[in-house]
Image: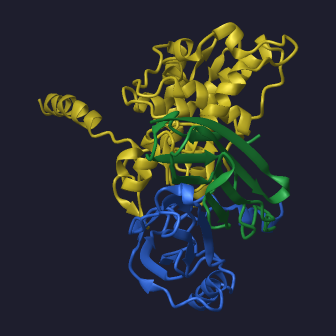
Chain colours: A yellow, B green, C blue
Amino acid sequence: MRRAAALLLLLVAAPARAEERRSGFADMAPATRAMQQDDMANPGMLWVLEGGALWQRPAGAAARSCADCHGDAAASMRGVAARYPAMDPGEGRAVDLAGRIALCQARHQGAEPAPRESQAALALAAYVAHQSRGMPIAPPADAGMDAVRAEGQALYRARRGQLDLSCAQCHDDNAGRRLAGSVIPQGHPTGYPLYRLEWQALGSLQRRLRGCMTGVRAAPPAYGAADLIAIEAYLMARAAGMPLETPAVRP
Amino acid sequence: MARVLLQVPATARRGEVIEIRALIQHPMETGFRPDASGVVAPRDIIRRFACTWDGETVFSAELHPAIAANPYLSFTALATASGTLEFAWTGDNGFAQTETRRVTVAE
Amino acid sequence: MASRRAVLAATPGLLAVALARPAGASPEAMRQAMREFLGPDAPVPRPGRVRLELPPLVENGNAVPLSVSVESPMTATDRVRSIAVFTERNPLPGVIIAQLGPRAGAARFATRIRLATSQQIVAVAVMGDGSVWSDSAQVVVTLAACVES
């Protein structure tokens, strides 16, 4: 009986919790929100602009551009970023959006993909993700991805580093409270790649994750590592339904 | 070539004061910032911006390292006659970029 | 293996971190920079006619929106010639010196600036008649909790 009551409570509580989810946008100062909302003031739009040029540029042995296969990104890429990370059947593993773009460059353009976190890689990812701005995050239903997301959840809850802190201890247990002058965000990856005032540049979710890990004095995995993609996949599932903001601005 | 976003109205009425906004991709490295190995990165900034209308200065500015990365500027121009607005950014390490926009001024 | 020094330098602060400031940052350095901008014969800036706007509280000092507007008809004979902005506690006091032509139409501009810490910011406008006007603003830069470097 008590167990049934507890379960009922859980079921009632679950949707309320979903509504309490907040994008980091909601916790920003008015000036920072204004910077994101105005495309002429949002520096992230410079990377989107650059990505749009790269989309049209022929590359690699095939001398083919992204547009030669995918046409107008406004149509073909709409909603795509909202579904990543996803399984790549050829590789038999989960890939994030940056990884998908790199695979595409290698397979179909015969090109050396731009290194992760390079300006070109970020620009193209921002351009593709920008086509999904305003669309709800929609992680794919896929048994393979379920396993990856479970792994990601375990990593999210694992204590790490000299400070012995898990992601969950800040971003679930203490979200909304303050650490020094900053509100601890819930950690929903709604706007990546995003322009971080601290970075003074655009950066990926993996950069943010690695920054958090070094923050708790843990050795972060290398860019592109399966562990980072698993955490990305879990966070996107945790943020399912929230609208994408790329390119977001954060302090 | 640095990416530039410019907002300039294509048309204006004579005597109208138009709003111009310009955003350019540039790190504005201050010359005070140590990198991960403790070495201070040398200064690399845009030092000057100028906007002219058919060669006549509308607005110009000397920028210092305290201007944020990816410099943003908004200012105004008086629409007197149709012409070409030129925007020029120049800076350290030979940085130079120019953009132009045509504005048609109606009576 | 990375040197101990490199590891320490690369380790981000959780609960950061006072930014090291060069010795030049001081109210006196700001007054000196203002004198250099105005020249030896200029009058002392009077408060008024200039409106300097910045958010009173910012969560990151790397990109703080700033706007300046000056009351002026902006005619060929009666206009603002230049507007400069100075800070009290940045490594260097100068921020921007703007020159306005007769084609500016209005005396206002906006940009984004860096503030190393909470401090006073001053805008000074020089008019066609040689008079000098100013406004100031105080900005609090809050301490960031998690920074990468």
Q: Position of residue C82 (x, y in %)?
A: 57, 70
Q: Is residue C43 above or below residue C143?
A: below
* Camera sees residue C92: yes
Q: Is residue A70 above or below residue C96?
A: above
Q: Nearer the viewer, residue A195 or A106?
A: A195
Badge count:
0
Residue lying at 66% horizontally and 47% vertically, measured from the top left: A220
Q: Nearer the viewer, residue B47 or B29?
A: B47
Q: Quadrant of residue C38?
A: bottom right
Q: Is residue B18 above or below residue A10?
A: below
**The N terminus of chain C - image quarter:** bottom right
**The C terminus of chain C - image quarter:** bottom right
Tell me: C55 left or right of A127.
Answer: left
Q: Nearer the viewer, residue A130 or C35?
A: C35
Q: Position of residue B50 (x, y in %)?
A: 67, 55
* Camera sees residue A96: no
